[in-house]
Image (cartoon, rainbow, N blue to C red):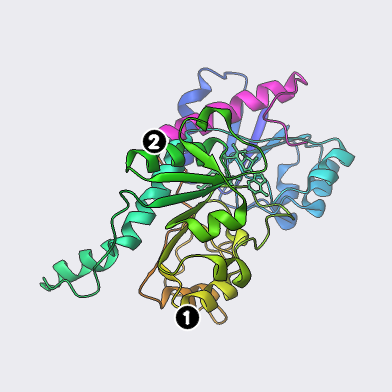
Amino acid sequence: MKLLFYAAKIYDKKSFNPLLEKYNEVEIDYIDHELEPITAALAKGYDAVCAFVSADVGARTLEILKENGVGIVLMRCAGFNNVDVEKAKELGIIVKRVPGYSPESVAELAMALALAVNRRLYKAYNKVRENDYTLKGLRGVNFYQKTAGIVGTGKIGAAMCRICRGFGMRVIAYDVYENPDLKDFVEYVSLDELLSQSDLISLHCPLMDFTYHMINIESIKKMKDGVILVNTSRGALVDTNELIEGIRLNKFLGIGLDVYEEETGNVYEDRSDDIMEHSVTARLLAFPNVMITSHQGFYTLEALASIADTTLFNLMEAKEGRKDGNDVA
Ligand code: NAI
Protein backbone atom coordinates (compact mmCIF):
# COMPACT_ATOMS: atom_id res chain seq x y z
CA MET A 1 0.00 0.00 0.00
CA LYS A 2 1.51 3.30 -1.10
CA LEU A 3 0.73 6.28 1.09
CA LEU A 4 1.53 9.90 0.24
CA PHE A 5 1.90 11.87 3.45
CA TYR A 6 1.14 15.59 3.01
CA ALA A 7 2.50 18.47 5.12
CA ALA A 8 4.94 16.11 6.83
CA LYS A 9 6.94 17.41 9.78
CA ILE A 10 9.95 15.79 11.41
CA TYR A 11 7.82 14.69 14.36
CA ASP A 12 5.44 12.90 11.94
CA LYS A 13 8.30 10.86 10.50
CA LYS A 14 9.51 10.08 14.01
CA SER A 15 6.14 8.70 15.04
CA PHE A 16 5.18 6.92 11.78
CA ASN A 17 8.50 5.36 10.64
CA PRO A 18 8.98 3.08 13.68
CA LEU A 19 5.55 1.56 12.97
CA LEU A 20 6.47 0.43 9.46
CA GLU A 21 7.84 -2.81 10.91
CA LYS A 22 4.39 -3.56 12.32
CA TYR A 23 2.56 -2.40 9.18
CA ASN A 24 5.08 -3.90 6.78
CA GLU A 25 2.87 -3.70 3.69
CA VAL A 26 2.87 0.09 3.89
CA GLU A 27 5.29 2.38 2.05
CA ILE A 28 5.20 6.07 2.96
CA ASP A 29 6.49 9.03 0.98
CA TYR A 30 6.55 12.26 2.94
CA ILE A 31 6.18 15.68 1.32
CA ASP A 32 6.14 19.20 2.76
CA HIS A 33 3.19 20.43 0.70
CA GLU A 34 -0.29 20.72 2.12
CA LEU A 35 -3.07 18.67 0.49
CA GLU A 36 -5.14 21.09 -1.59
CA PRO A 37 -6.39 21.22 -5.19
CA ILE A 38 -3.04 22.36 -6.55
CA THR A 39 -1.11 19.51 -4.88
CA ALA A 40 -3.68 16.71 -5.07
CA ALA A 41 -2.39 15.38 -8.42
CA LEU A 42 0.96 14.58 -6.76
CA ALA A 43 -0.81 11.54 -5.33
CA LYS A 44 -1.06 9.85 -8.74
CA GLY A 45 0.07 6.25 -8.30
CA TYR A 46 -0.64 6.17 -4.55
CA ASP A 47 -3.40 4.16 -2.87
CA ALA A 48 -3.95 6.65 -0.09
CA VAL A 49 -3.12 10.13 1.13
CA CYS A 50 -2.64 11.31 4.68
CA ALA A 51 -3.65 14.88 5.63
CA PHE A 52 -4.02 17.10 8.67
CA VAL A 53 -6.13 19.94 10.05
CA SER A 54 -5.07 22.67 7.61
CA ALA A 55 -5.53 20.59 4.44
CA ASP A 56 -8.25 21.56 1.99
CA VAL A 57 -10.08 18.29 1.46
CA GLY A 58 -12.94 19.98 -0.34
CA ALA A 59 -14.79 18.88 -3.47
CA ARG A 60 -12.09 19.90 -5.97
CA THR A 61 -9.29 18.14 -4.07
CA LEU A 62 -11.39 14.99 -3.81
CA GLU A 63 -12.21 15.06 -7.53
CA ILE A 64 -8.52 15.35 -8.43
CA LEU A 65 -7.62 12.52 -6.05
CA LYS A 66 -10.30 10.37 -7.66
CA GLU A 67 -9.09 11.23 -11.19
CA ASN A 68 -5.61 10.13 -10.08
CA GLY A 69 -6.78 6.80 -8.72
CA VAL A 70 -6.58 7.59 -4.99
CA GLY A 71 -9.37 5.89 -3.04
CA ILE A 72 -8.45 6.51 0.60
CA VAL A 73 -7.99 9.71 2.60
CA LEU A 74 -6.53 9.29 6.07
CA MET A 75 -7.01 12.29 8.36
CA ARG A 76 -4.38 12.16 11.10
CA CYS A 77 -6.61 14.20 13.42
CA ALA A 78 -9.99 14.02 15.13
CA GLY A 79 -11.78 16.96 13.48
CA PHE A 80 -12.88 16.65 9.84
CA ASN A 81 -14.58 19.99 9.20
CA ASN A 82 -12.12 20.53 6.32
CA VAL A 83 -13.42 17.44 4.48
CA ASP A 84 -16.36 17.57 2.05
CA VAL A 85 -17.91 14.38 3.39
CA GLU A 86 -20.82 14.30 0.94
CA LYS A 87 -18.49 14.68 -2.04
CA ALA A 88 -16.25 11.89 -0.73
CA LYS A 89 -19.28 9.61 -0.41
CA GLU A 90 -20.45 10.55 -3.91
CA LEU A 91 -17.01 9.73 -5.34
CA GLY A 92 -16.66 6.54 -3.30
CA ILE A 93 -13.52 7.77 -1.54
CA ILE A 94 -13.04 6.28 1.92
CA VAL A 95 -12.19 8.89 4.56
CA LYS A 96 -11.05 7.82 8.01
CA ARG A 97 -9.88 9.82 11.01
CA VAL A 98 -8.43 9.33 14.46
CA PRO A 99 -11.32 10.16 16.76
CA GLY A 100 -9.79 9.44 20.12
CA TYR A 101 -6.04 9.54 20.57
CA SER A 102 -5.11 10.68 24.07
CA PRO A 103 -7.97 13.07 24.92
CA GLU A 104 -5.94 14.08 27.95
CA SER A 105 -3.33 15.70 25.70
CA VAL A 106 -5.90 18.30 24.59
CA ALA A 107 -7.72 18.59 27.92
CA GLU A 108 -4.45 19.17 29.80
CA LEU A 109 -3.57 21.97 27.36
CA ALA A 110 -7.03 23.48 27.89
CA MET A 111 -6.37 23.60 31.64
CA ALA A 112 -2.84 24.90 31.05
CA LEU A 113 -4.29 27.78 29.00
CA ALA A 114 -6.92 28.47 31.66
CA LEU A 115 -4.24 28.65 34.36
CA ALA A 116 -1.83 30.65 32.21
CA VAL A 117 -4.37 33.37 31.43
CA ASN A 118 -5.74 33.39 34.96
CA ARG A 119 -2.33 33.85 36.59
CA ARG A 120 -0.85 35.74 33.59
CA LEU A 121 2.05 33.29 33.41
CA TYR A 122 3.21 34.64 30.03
CA LYS A 123 3.57 38.07 31.61
CA ALA A 124 5.14 36.79 34.84
CA TYR A 125 7.74 34.77 32.90
CA ASN A 126 8.84 37.81 30.92
CA LYS A 127 8.80 40.15 33.92
CA VAL A 128 11.15 38.00 35.97
CA ARG A 129 13.47 37.56 32.98
CA GLU A 130 13.64 41.36 32.81
CA ASN A 131 14.52 41.65 36.52
CA ASP A 132 11.05 43.03 37.24
CA TYR A 133 9.78 41.35 40.40
CA THR A 134 6.65 43.47 40.85
CA LEU A 135 3.22 41.84 40.85
CA LYS A 136 1.46 44.45 38.75
CA GLY A 137 -1.04 42.89 36.37
CA LEU A 138 -0.62 39.38 37.74
CA ARG A 139 -3.55 38.98 40.13
CA GLY A 140 -5.71 35.95 39.33
CA VAL A 141 -8.54 34.03 41.00
CA ASN A 142 -8.78 30.61 42.65
CA PHE A 143 -10.37 27.86 40.60
CA TYR A 144 -11.16 25.95 43.80
CA GLN A 145 -14.94 26.06 44.46
CA LYS A 146 -15.60 27.97 41.24
CA THR A 147 -17.81 26.64 38.42
CA ALA A 148 -16.37 25.08 35.27
CA GLY A 149 -18.72 24.93 32.27
CA ILE A 150 -17.73 22.33 29.69
CA VAL A 151 -19.35 22.56 26.26
CA GLY A 152 -19.23 19.12 24.63
CA THR A 153 -18.55 16.15 26.89
CA GLY A 154 -17.16 13.61 24.44
CA LYS A 155 -13.69 12.21 24.96
CA ILE A 156 -11.80 15.49 25.43
CA GLY A 157 -14.59 17.31 27.25
CA ALA A 158 -14.92 14.37 29.66
CA ALA A 159 -11.18 14.50 30.38
CA MET A 160 -11.52 18.24 31.02
CA CYS A 161 -14.45 17.59 33.40
CA ARG A 162 -12.24 15.19 35.39
CA ILE A 163 -9.38 17.71 35.51
CA CYS A 164 -11.72 20.47 36.72
CA ARG A 165 -13.13 18.18 39.40
CA GLY A 166 -9.52 17.56 40.51
CA PHE A 167 -9.20 21.31 41.07
CA GLY A 168 -12.18 21.20 43.41
CA MET A 169 -14.50 22.93 40.96
CA ARG A 170 -18.22 22.44 40.52
CA VAL A 171 -18.54 21.02 37.01
CA ILE A 172 -21.54 21.78 34.79
CA ALA A 173 -21.84 20.81 31.14
CA TYR A 174 -23.85 21.27 27.99
CA ASP A 175 -24.03 18.64 25.26
CA VAL A 176 -26.68 17.33 22.90
CA TYR A 177 -26.05 13.89 24.49
CA GLU A 178 -25.27 13.27 28.16
CA ASN A 179 -22.16 11.21 28.85
CA PRO A 180 -23.16 8.48 31.36
CA ASP A 181 -19.54 8.17 32.60
CA LEU A 182 -19.79 11.66 34.09
CA LYS A 183 -23.11 11.40 35.89
CA ASP A 184 -21.51 11.12 39.36
CA PHE A 185 -20.10 14.64 39.33
CA VAL A 186 -21.26 16.58 36.28
CA GLU A 187 -24.55 18.43 36.17
CA TYR A 188 -25.98 18.92 32.66
CA VAL A 189 -27.61 22.30 32.09
CA SER A 190 -28.83 24.31 29.09
CA LEU A 191 -26.25 26.32 27.14
CA ASP A 192 -27.71 29.57 28.51
CA GLU A 193 -27.43 28.29 32.09
CA LEU A 194 -23.84 27.21 31.45
CA LEU A 195 -22.97 30.62 30.01
CA SER A 196 -24.48 32.51 32.94
CA GLN A 197 -23.13 30.30 35.76
CA SER A 198 -19.57 29.43 34.71
CA ASP A 199 -16.34 31.04 35.88
CA LEU A 200 -14.39 28.98 33.37
CA ILE A 201 -15.91 27.98 30.01
CA SER A 202 -14.05 25.42 27.90
CA LEU A 203 -15.21 24.44 24.40
CA HIS A 204 -14.93 20.79 23.34
CA CYS A 205 -17.64 20.28 20.72
CA PRO A 206 -17.03 19.79 17.00
CA LEU A 207 -17.37 22.54 14.41
CA MET A 208 -20.60 22.04 12.46
CA ASP A 209 -23.21 24.37 10.95
CA PHE A 210 -25.02 24.28 14.28
CA THR A 211 -21.96 25.17 16.39
CA TYR A 212 -20.41 27.74 13.98
CA HIS A 213 -19.95 31.03 15.91
CA MET A 214 -21.77 29.62 18.96
CA ILE A 215 -19.69 32.10 20.96
CA ASN A 216 -20.85 35.48 19.65
CA ILE A 217 -21.72 38.80 21.22
CA GLU A 218 -25.13 37.51 22.30
CA SER A 219 -23.69 34.48 24.09
CA ILE A 220 -20.82 36.57 25.50
CA LYS A 221 -23.31 39.02 27.04
CA LYS A 222 -24.92 36.08 28.86
CA MET A 223 -21.58 35.18 30.52
CA LYS A 224 -20.51 36.32 33.98
CA ASP A 225 -18.18 39.30 34.14
CA GLY A 226 -14.65 38.05 34.78
CA VAL A 227 -15.17 34.72 33.03
CA ILE A 228 -12.28 32.74 31.52
CA LEU A 229 -12.91 31.30 28.05
CA VAL A 230 -10.80 28.52 26.57
CA ASN A 231 -11.11 27.11 23.05
CA THR A 232 -9.04 24.07 22.11
CA SER A 233 -11.63 22.70 19.70
CA ARG A 234 -12.02 24.63 16.43
CA GLY A 235 -11.51 28.33 15.78
CA ALA A 236 -14.82 29.04 14.11
CA LEU A 237 -16.80 28.06 17.20
CA VAL A 238 -15.98 31.62 18.24
CA ASP A 239 -16.79 34.76 16.22
CA THR A 240 -13.44 36.53 16.59
CA ASN A 241 -14.73 40.05 15.85
CA GLU A 242 -17.49 39.66 18.41
CA LEU A 243 -15.01 38.17 20.90
CA ILE A 244 -12.99 41.37 20.55
CA GLU A 245 -16.19 43.33 21.18
CA GLY A 246 -16.70 41.25 24.33
CA ILE A 247 -13.14 41.90 25.50
CA ARG A 248 -13.73 45.62 25.06
CA LEU A 249 -16.86 45.28 27.24
CA ASN A 250 -14.48 43.94 29.94
CA LYS A 251 -16.24 40.58 30.08
CA PHE A 252 -13.19 38.36 30.36
CA LEU A 253 -10.60 37.75 33.02
CA GLY A 254 -8.75 35.75 30.41
CA ILE A 255 -9.03 34.01 27.05
CA GLY A 256 -6.91 31.03 26.03
CA LEU A 257 -7.09 29.86 22.43
CA ASP A 258 -5.29 26.91 20.89
CA VAL A 259 -7.41 27.38 17.77
CA TYR A 260 -8.69 30.53 16.08
CA GLU A 261 -10.48 31.45 12.89
CA GLU A 262 -7.46 32.69 10.95
CA GLU A 263 -5.18 29.78 11.76
CA THR A 264 -5.20 28.19 8.29
CA GLY A 265 -1.99 29.31 6.63
CA ASN A 266 -0.33 29.91 10.01
CA VAL A 267 -0.50 26.48 11.61
CA TYR A 268 3.02 25.09 12.06
CA GLU A 269 4.59 27.79 9.83
CA ASP A 270 7.18 30.38 10.82
CA ARG A 271 5.63 33.65 9.70
CA SER A 272 7.68 35.90 11.96
CA ASP A 273 8.90 38.01 9.02
CA ASP A 274 5.48 38.43 7.43
CA ILE A 275 3.41 41.58 7.65
CA MET A 276 -0.13 40.47 8.45
CA GLU A 277 -2.18 43.12 6.70
CA HIS A 278 -5.67 42.25 7.83
CA SER A 279 -5.02 40.04 10.82
CA VAL A 280 -7.83 39.92 13.38
CA THR A 281 -5.57 37.62 15.39
CA ALA A 282 -2.99 40.40 15.76
CA ARG A 283 -5.75 42.60 17.16
CA LEU A 284 -6.68 39.85 19.61
CA LEU A 285 -3.08 39.48 20.74
CA ALA A 286 -2.91 43.17 21.57
CA PHE A 287 -5.02 42.51 24.68
CA PRO A 288 -3.16 41.64 27.90
CA ASN A 289 -5.65 38.93 28.88
CA VAL A 290 -5.40 36.81 25.71
CA MET A 291 -3.01 33.95 25.10
CA ILE A 292 -2.91 32.04 21.81
CA THR A 293 -1.08 28.83 21.02
CA SER A 294 -0.92 27.29 17.56
CA HIS A 295 -3.02 24.13 17.54
CA GLN A 296 -0.70 22.17 19.81
CA GLY A 297 -3.30 20.33 21.85
CA PHE A 298 -2.46 17.02 20.19
CA TYR A 299 1.28 17.53 20.53
CA THR A 300 2.40 15.09 23.21
CA LEU A 301 4.51 11.99 22.82
CA GLU A 302 1.61 9.74 23.76
CA ALA A 303 -0.86 11.40 21.39
CA LEU A 304 1.54 11.31 18.42
CA ALA A 305 2.23 7.60 18.92
CA SER A 306 -1.47 6.88 19.12
CA ILE A 307 -2.28 9.00 16.03
CA ALA A 308 0.36 7.17 13.96
CA ASP A 309 -0.80 3.73 15.04
CA THR A 310 -4.50 4.45 14.44
CA THR A 311 -3.81 6.10 11.04
CA LEU A 312 -1.95 3.02 9.77
CA PHE A 313 -4.59 0.75 11.30
CA ASN A 314 -7.19 2.82 9.40
CA LEU A 315 -5.27 2.25 6.17
CA MET A 316 -5.37 -1.52 6.70
CA GLU A 317 -9.06 -1.41 7.55
CA ALA A 318 -9.80 0.68 4.44
CA LYS A 319 -7.80 -1.71 2.29
CA GLU A 320 -9.90 -4.62 3.59
CA GLY A 321 -13.07 -2.57 3.06
CA ARG A 322 -13.90 -2.75 6.75
CA LYS A 323 -16.05 -0.01 8.29
CA ASP A 324 -15.66 1.09 11.89
CA GLY A 325 -16.08 4.05 14.20
CA ASN A 326 -13.18 5.87 12.52
CA ASP A 327 -15.03 6.25 9.21
CA VAL A 328 -16.00 9.73 8.08
CA ALA A 329 -17.09 8.63 4.60
P1 NAI B 1 -16.03 13.68 20.58
O1 NAI B 1 -16.74 13.36 19.33
O2 NAI B 1 -15.61 12.57 21.49
O3 NAI B 1 -16.93 14.69 21.44
C1 NAI B 1 -17.61 15.78 20.91
C2 NAI B 1 -18.81 16.06 21.79
O4 NAI B 1 -19.45 17.23 21.33
C3 NAI B 1 -19.85 14.91 21.74
O5 NAI B 1 -20.20 14.53 23.05
C4 NAI B 1 -21.03 15.56 21.02
O6 NAI B 1 -22.29 15.05 21.44
C5 NAI B 1 -20.84 17.01 21.43
N1 NAI B 1 -21.61 17.93 20.60
C6 NAI B 1 -22.02 17.79 19.32
N2 NAI B 1 -22.74 18.85 18.95
C7 NAI B 1 -22.81 19.66 20.02
C8 NAI B 1 -23.43 20.92 20.27
N3 NAI B 1 -24.15 21.53 19.32
N4 NAI B 1 -23.30 21.47 21.49
C9 NAI B 1 -22.60 20.85 22.47
N5 NAI B 1 -21.98 19.65 22.29
C10 NAI B 1 -22.09 19.08 21.09
O7 NAI B 1 -14.80 14.59 20.17
P2 NAI B 1 -13.45 14.85 20.98
O8 NAI B 1 -12.46 13.80 20.65
O9 NAI B 1 -13.78 15.11 22.40
O10 NAI B 1 -12.94 16.20 20.28
C11 NAI B 1 -13.64 17.42 20.41
C12 NAI B 1 -13.08 18.43 19.43
O11 NAI B 1 -11.73 18.77 19.80
C13 NAI B 1 -12.92 17.90 17.99
O12 NAI B 1 -14.11 18.14 17.26
C14 NAI B 1 -11.79 18.69 17.42
O13 NAI B 1 -12.33 19.79 16.71
C15 NAI B 1 -11.04 19.23 18.66
N6 NAI B 1 -9.65 18.76 18.74
C16 NAI B 1 -8.64 19.69 18.89
C17 NAI B 1 -7.31 19.29 18.98
C18 NAI B 1 -6.20 20.27 19.19
O14 NAI B 1 -5.03 19.92 18.91
N7 NAI B 1 -6.46 21.47 19.66
C19 NAI B 1 -6.96 17.88 18.88
C20 NAI B 1 -8.10 16.98 18.81
C21 NAI B 1 -9.38 17.43 18.70
Quadrant location, ligand no. 1? top right
**Residue 266 position within the rendered picture, expressed as x and y whole percent measured from the top left:** 52, 63
Instruction: Kindly identify the residue that appears in the image at 71 percent across and 52 percent down.
Output: 208
**Residue 170 position within the rendered picture, expressed as x and y whole percent measured from the top left:** 41, 45
**Residue 251 position within the rendered picture, expressed as x and y whole percent measured from the top left:** 46, 72
**Label 2 or label 1, whichever comes before in sequence order:** 1
Dot 1 crowding, Cα within 10 Å, few <14, some 14–19, many 20+: few
28 vs 67, left or right, is: left
- Name the residue that disc number 1 marks: 248
Please tell me which residue lies in front, 169 or 61. Answer: 169
Q: Secondary structure at mark 2?
A: helix
Query: Which of the numbered marks, if any, corresponds to residue 301?
Result: 2
In which quadrant of the rendered view does residue 218 lie? bottom right
Q: Is mark 2 within 8 Å of ligand 1?
A: no
**Residue 52 position within the rendered picture, expressed as x and y whole percent measured from the top left:** 60, 46
Magenta residues span 302-329
Instruction: Kindly identify the residue that appears in the image at 65 percent across and 63 percent down.
Output: 213
Please tell me which residue lies in front, 288 or 32. Answer: 288
Type of the residue with mark 2 = Leu
Q: What number of labels is visible? A: 2
118 vs 104, left or right, is: left
